[in-house]
């Protein structure tokens, strides 16, 4: 009998956990734009808001698993993770050469993200000064877009396996405003070349991107940094492979922090050596506490 009761409790807990995922939508330019998030377990106000943006051709609900480790800390550290869904699984992320529908139809991503920020301000009383954007691949390009076109709404961004489009491939008007920026790129990435060049994914050509160093220096220059960043080495959680992670940081209390995590031999994937979203939250948290 006790075994049966225990099994029922496990099933109930599982269903309860599954029921925590909320999907909602906003009507933007005649289209319903969908987003997902886990309902906060507490009624705490003043939470930080973090967008976790899926890559090109991806799905927001499936992407949630990549931030599962970070999600477990959302209540104790008072933040809400939001997973927006791209238009037809893609984004209008400032790449002129992109042939996806989101770009060709000039989908208003700024209106979508502004709408979501207002939604969480109204319904969950989040701290509007602590809004962050993070994304992987095409989602990283979207994080750049938030910093390029609407930096006044974000405290910081984290772009994972993504480089800035080259000037000739950039079709958004640059605000050229300083903002806290983290870039996490692998040196052996065949999709988003670390040294810059053409991006190809899923049979699509998305134009050229700058090198990682150029992308890093772009944001560092806007924050007023010059010279050389502080170099560090992250602990190696998986010594059985040939991947290591170096950090390069510009940090001054009077300026937004700009950090690069250089994943040596890293590819276009979530590495086992570090948890990208955990490192992203560490970076965002510094921007809140400093």
Image: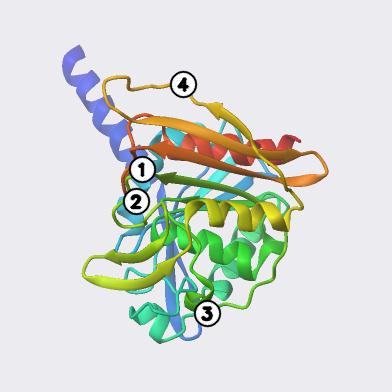
Cα gap from disc 1 to disc 3, whole angstroms: 30 Å
Residue 145, horizontal then vertical, whole percent: 55, 66
Cα gap from disc 4 to disc 3, whole angstroms: 39 Å
Q: Which mark is residue 207?
A: none
Residue 53, horizontal then vertical, whole percent: 44, 56
1 or 3: tag closer to the N-terminus? 1
Look at the numbered disc 4 and give the secondary structure of its residue: loop
Marks 2 and 1 in Cβ contact (< 8 Å): yes
Cα gap from disc 2 to disc 3, whole angstroms: 27 Å
Figure label count: 4
Q: Nearer the viewer, mark 4 or mark 1?
A: 4
Q: Which residue is mark 2?
A: 63
Q: Which residue is mark 4?
A: 235
4 or 1: tag closer to the N-terminus? 1
Which image quadrant is residue 272 in?
Answer: top left
Q: Which residue is mark 1?
A: 66
Cα gap from disc 2 to disc 1, whole angstroms: 6 Å
Seen in the picture, residue 75 relative to 95 is either above or below; the reply is: above
User: Residue visible at 67% across and 36% down?
Assistant: 286
The answer to whether one can see residue 103 in this image is yes
Cα gap from disc 4 to disc 2, whole angstroms: 26 Å
Cα gap from disc 4 to disc 1, whole angstroms: 21 Å
Q: Which residue is mark 3?
A: 171
Q: Nearer the viewer, mark 2 or mark 3?
A: 3
4 or 3: tag closer to the N-terminus? 3
């Amino acid at each position: 009998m006790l075994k049966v009761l225990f099994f029922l409790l496990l099933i109930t807990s599982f269903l309860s956990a599954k029921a925590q995922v909320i999907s909602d939508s906003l009507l933007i330019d005649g289209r319903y734009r969908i987003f997902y998030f886990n309902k906060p377990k507490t009624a705490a106000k003043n939470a930080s808001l973090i967008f976790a943006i899926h890559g090109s051709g991806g799905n927001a609900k499936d992407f949630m698993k990549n931030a599962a480790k970070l999600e477990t800390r959302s209540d104790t550290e008072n933040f809400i993770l939001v997973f927006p869904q791209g238009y037809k699984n893609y984004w209008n992320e400032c790449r002129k050469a992109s042939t996806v529908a989101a770009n060709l139809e000039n989908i208003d991503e700024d209106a979508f993200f502004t709408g979501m920020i207002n939604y969480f301000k109204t319904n969950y009383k989040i701290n509007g000064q602590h809004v962050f954007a993070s994304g992987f691949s095409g989602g990283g390009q979207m994080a750049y877009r938030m910093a390029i076109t609407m930096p006044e709404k974000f405290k910081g961004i984290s772009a994972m396996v993504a480089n800035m489009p080259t000037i000739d491939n950039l079709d958004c008007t640059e605000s050229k405003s300083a903002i806290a920026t983290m870039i996490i790129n692998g040196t052996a990435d065949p999709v988003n070349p670390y040294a810059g060049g053409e991006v190809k994914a899923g049979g699509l050509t998305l134009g050229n991107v700058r090198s990682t160093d150029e992308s890093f220096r772009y944001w560092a220059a806007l924050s007023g940094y010059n010279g050389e960043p502080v170099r560090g080495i992250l602990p190696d959680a998986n010594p059985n492979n040939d991947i290591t992670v170096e950090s390069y940081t510009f940090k001054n209390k009077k300026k937004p922090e700009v950090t690069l995590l250089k994943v040596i031999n890293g590819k276009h994937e979530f590495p086992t050596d570090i948890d990208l979203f955990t490192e992203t939250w560490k970076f965002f948290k510094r921007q809140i506490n400093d």
